[in-house]
Image: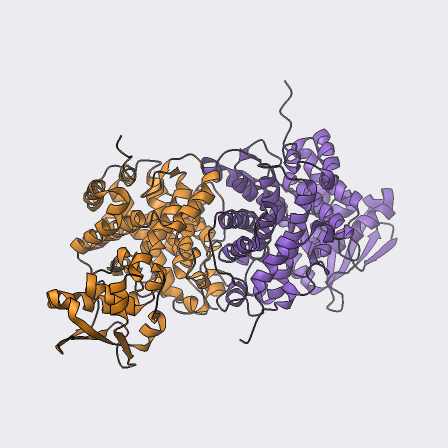
Chain colours: A orange, B purple
Amino acid sequence: MGHRPDVTRALAEWIVACPSTAIPEEIRTEGVRTFVNWLGCAIGGATHETVDRALAAVAPFSGAPEASVLGRSERLDPLHAALINGISSHVLDYDDTHLKTIIHPAGPVASALLAIAETRPVTGTAFLDALIIGVETECRIGNAVYPDHYDRGWHITGTAGVFGAAAATSRLLGLDVQATTWALGIAATQASGLREMFGTMCKSFHPGRAAQNGAFAAFLAQAGFDSSERAIEASRGFAQVMSDKQDYDEILDGLGTHWEAALNSYKPFACGIVIHPAIDGCIQLRDALGNDVDRIARVELTAHPLVLELTGKAEPRTGLEGKFSIFHAAASALLHGDGSPTAFTDEAVNDPALVALRRNVQVTTDPGCYEASVTIAVTLDDGRRLEKHIDRAIGSRERPLSDDRIEAKFRGQAAMVIGEQPCESVIQAAWQIAAMDDVGALARTCTPRPPTR
Amino acid sequence: MGHRPDVTRALAEWIVACPSTAIPEEIRTEGVRTFVNWLGCAIGGATHETVDRALAAVAPFSGAPEASVLGRSERLDPLHAALINGISSHVLDYDDTHLKTIIHPAGPVASALLAIAETRPVTGTAFLDALIIGVETECRIGNAVYPDHYDRGWHITGTAGVFGAAAATSRLLGLDVQATTWALGIAATQASGLREMFGTMCKSFHPGRAAQNGAFAAFLAQAGFDSSERAIEASRGFAQVMSDKQDYDEILDGLGTHWEAALNSYKPFACGIVIHPAIDGCIQLRDALGNDVDRIARVELTAHPLVLELTGKAEPRTGLEGKFSIFHAAASALLHGDGSPTAFTDEAVNDPALVALRRNVQVTTDPGCYEASVTIAVTLDDGRRLEKHIDRAIGSRERPLSDDRIEAKFRGQAAMVIGEQPCESVIQAAWQIAAMDDVGALARTCTPRPPTR
């Protein structure tokens, strides 16, 4: 093995000591975007059946109701709130993505932090510091083991996410290096989540449980509960046991100067990222077509084979199946300009006009086509033909979502959950998080307005 | 891959349908011994610092205090009680062992069941059914992946234990096959616990967390929270992701006719099983020596090299280090006949008489010596020499602990925690668990008597 740096301890030292002022302004700005995007997703997913069922199960065991369940009227102890808010934020597959590892970074980290921020005064500065440090931690640990770890079958948002939640909570609680090292160790020994669960309620359980378990790890460490101090790098530690690849330089090199947290991206559309170029291009074609959108006779897509492999469901019957149908997604984007959660309801996939159009969508695969690109040709009933090539979709790192688009996305999913006016207030407040004295107060506004009498 | 039985579902069908009357009497008897041994350990470990710290961390988050923390006055919600009682029962390394997999079966299973039994009426019959079915489930899943899974670095008591807790809780709650299948899946996606944590507080955290997570899996499934239905055997399921060996016949063959639960064994001594033959032999020599025990001049042990590798600490300074010192253990057994927790305190390892004797203990290694055997030669100051060969130690499957010894072990660790008289009452009641109408009532007697005024 040779000599190896004390990876876990060195990481803990940075988590504890990184000065707030050493986080560059553009990283803080990205942190705010990460937070706003996450908050919209957590409110937007709150009425999903997955959340209903998880809440029914946890309610009998909850401690003091100190923390909000975002988008709902229930209140729970902060660890259970972290679980449920983490589930909500991921349940629509609409949250953020660290594209190098396909970790969804905010779910484990922000869900832990906001729930804890309801139990003690936390300033916006302290909150953002912890959020950014947590995201940085999980993405770097992810980089160290990706792709082998993911290929083996681990849902990396859960397995790396638990470290992010532990790091962020340790920072928020002001733990010292010793306790933060233990927190990372207690996180390591709870790292879990199988990709086998994709397509079931357990997929969104993973970021929720990572938030809850990582936060709990920090509270245990605060109470003096110890763990291995080399939990990441030891020969029976996380990286060796759960991956064939271990590149510890990914964890320690350039800590505080190079920021993985800067690489977060935000989905514009509520489905797998592989269909995003098609939706993006179809919406642009719709804009060009104007009223002629009703005259579409044929749609031809040319994409990488992987796209069809992952999203080739020709006749989806449920909204969830619609997320795996490039045929439906293209039809919805052309006919309604919609790639938001409303495009992937049971009603939408069974709408006769959409069904008719999707049956006129053909997909040709071309291994020479880049995975993140697509070419779309639309032929109208009078023979006219329009073509659109998308090299990189909106939402990719090359074409990041603007603040306006993040805000529109927030509105599009959260307004129907908590009402339009409360939603606008939350959006405005969320953008101002950096200046807040008490972040927890924001959480308490993210709930449905009680019915007017 | 070829066709593979639906392992998870077939196991769930057995968990649901196994008739209480189909569990043979000798298996029920072993179940009672498993329960009594576990209860003594959970009470005996309750005052350990590890438990203090875990309790301090969980107390602010506990729900309604419906369940007892065994051996203590605190009360918690049943899931947190399962966690703490699971920690207590393993913290002294004194609990039960399924020797084929070195799973400690009762911690994850009994800790979940007894806490839940305080929230609803549970008969002794239903409790024992669930306990035996849970132990059977975890040991069979362990057999399917052992030893590769363990060799890779997984603490199998945590990773297999979570299935045991899920199975037992599903059975106790009366879940149907669908929900029980989901519970096993939700358990699979939480399977965790690294061997890297050995020597830290996280080691006993593993059975505790397995109890809590497995029970929670069953409550989630009861609320309709779904999971993969092939979580054990799928290509990205538990067995493939976490082990190079997958022998599914170990899970399904002879279910209900061959019982792994019959193979549970109980440690007579509060230390690693590898020193047990030496302690056993030294106690027998002490009995033979009578008053001459003070005249020992030299002790020579001959053992397999592994024994010295694991327990070769010549000068232990703490009670914990004493558990890894065959020199101390032999001296304590000769001088005091003691291999119980009182033999492994900080005071004991620093006792001058014990220090003097342990410095006269020599160990010779012999690869030809069976790992579970030892030869002990004692030379007295007048030149007399006594020898004792132990082929299999007390507590092994070949020489199982008698009910009397299990009871003495219970008394030896639990009386000092809850008081002698309450301890006797608990012991008597625990042996009678099969006939109880309300098992939860027993838990409420396992706490220290309030101080007399």
Q: Is residue B390 left or right of residue B322?
A: right
User: Residue A27, located in which quarter of the rendered image?
Assistant: bottom left
Where is residue B59? Give x, y as percent: 48, 36
Where is residue B108? Give x, y as percent: 59, 49
Where is residue B384? Give x, y as percent: 88, 53
Outermost residue, top direction?
B453
Where is residue B363? Give x, y as percent: 73, 59
Residue B380 vs residue B234, the one in the foreground: B234
Residue A278 vs residue A190, the one in the foreground: A278
User: Residue B425, located in which quarter of the rendered image?
Assistant: top right
Q: Residue at x 68, y 51 (%)?
A: B132
User: Residue A203, located in which quarter of the rendered image?
Assistant: bottom left
Residue B3 vs residue A171, the one in the foreground: B3
Instruction: Locate the C terminus of chain A by quadrant.
Output: top left
Q: Is residue A310 left or right of residue B77?
A: left
**Number of marks in picture:** 0
Residue A218 vs residue B118, the one in the foreground: B118
**Whether residue A258 is visible:** no
Q: Residue at x 28, y 48 (%)?
A: A39
- Position of residue A380 relative to residue A442, above or below, is below
